[in-house]
Image (cartoon, helix red, strand yellow):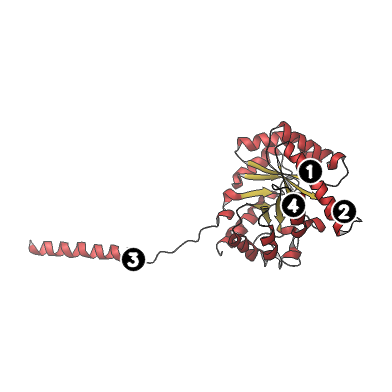
Amino acid sequence: MRLSIFLLTLLISGACQKSQTENSQPQVEIAETPAIYDMENLLAWCVVPFDSEARGPVARVDMLEQLGFTKFAYDWRDQHLPSFPEEVDLLNQKQIELTSVWWWIDGQGDDLLNKGNQQLLHYLDSLDISCDIWMSFSDGYFEGLDDAATLEKAVESVNILHQKAADVGCKLMLYNHGSWFGDPRNQVDIIEKSGLNDIGIVYNFHHAHQQIDQFPELLELMLPYLNTVNINGMNENGPKILTVGQGQREAEMLKALVESGFDGHIGIIGHLEQEDVEQVLKRNILGLEQITKTL
């Protein structure tokens, strides 16, 4: 009887020691994804006109939902505008936020807006949509002007466009698309000289390969106004569109965004007309996931 009790005691003691040993093993820490790179903070951009499958609103919104997007920025061509109200309704049904729409300003229409931009503005008003309007000027908009005159015209134009956006409950964002207007230093000058305190900046990696080495300096300058950063694979000499994770420099730029305290949106782009945009978005999401494991 005493032997049985002794053996039982040894057994229990051994089990406890094993449990303590297992619990004392060092735990492997899994790095958390920085908040700005969480899926819920990612928005889909360059989707509508860049799709070899030529999806309509139903298929496109279903695709966004299946990929896990909860935010969407609307790029378009004239042929897409008639179905914009349907798209908005479908986005609402799927609880996908329409964060932004696009204006390309070429100065050809009345009050700066061509017919397509006017139609989109009408939809934003009639559908009671409050979102950001990302806008950029065409290269020819400032043709023949020196820097001082260019800045003056840009400030005047941005003030007009800001008022049009505000009249329908939207905010204006300056979008870098190359040339003079695509330099963040000029965009900050425009904002500060406009006297407006609710204009933001949308920075696109794919329009800034030439600014990679300057990015830390430019980020510090833009940060008070920075609303969204659309990411891309980054090499000094391009190509313009490259899958995230396949470039040499985007990892350091993504790390700089985290370290800066930036808390705006991150855009995942599908900017390849000859490919299925679903596959392009998937590749970029996967590339971002791989990079964030190292941050």
Find disc 1 in the rendering and name its residue.
Answer: 161
Query: Could you tell which of marks 2 and 3 lies nearer the N-terminus?
Result: 3
Crowd band around label 3 with a 10 angstrom C-alpha radius: few (<14), some (14–19), many (20+): few
Please name which of the two marks, 4 or 1, marks the residue nearer to the observer.
Answer: 4
Residue 245 sits in which quadrant? bottom right
Secondary element type, mark 1: helix
Q: Is residue 29 visible?
A: yes
Find disc 4 in the rendering and name its residue.
Answer: 191
Near-viewer residue (34 or 84): 34
Secondary element type, mark 2: helix
Residue type indicated by callout 2: Phe
Name above or below for residue 44 compared with residue 167. Answer: below
Query: Could you tell which of marks 3 and 1 lies nearer the N-terminus?
Result: 3
Whole-number angstrom distance, CA of label 2 to CA of label 4: 17 Å
Query: Could you tell which of marks 2 and 4 lies nearer the N-terminus?
Result: 2
Find disc 2 in the rendering and name its residue.
Answer: 142
Residue type indicated by callout 1: Leu
Q: Is residue 23 left or right of residue 13?
A: right
Near-viewer residue (201 or 284): 201
Query: Could you tell which of marks 2 and 1 lies nearer the N-terminus?
Result: 2
Residue at 74% across, 40% down: 165
Residue at 21% across, 64% down: 13
Find disc 3 in the rendering and name its residue.
Answer: 24
Whole-number angstrom distance, CA of label 4 to CA of label 3: 57 Å
Near-viewer residue (123 or 193): 193
Secondary element type, mark 4: helix
Query: Could you tell which of marks 4 and 1 lies nearer the N-terminus?
Result: 1
Please name which of the two marks, 4 or 3, marks the residue nearer to the observer.
Answer: 4
Whole-number angstrom distance, CA of label 2 to CA of label 1: 16 Å
Query: Could you tell which of marks 4 and 3 lies nearer the N-terminus?
Result: 3
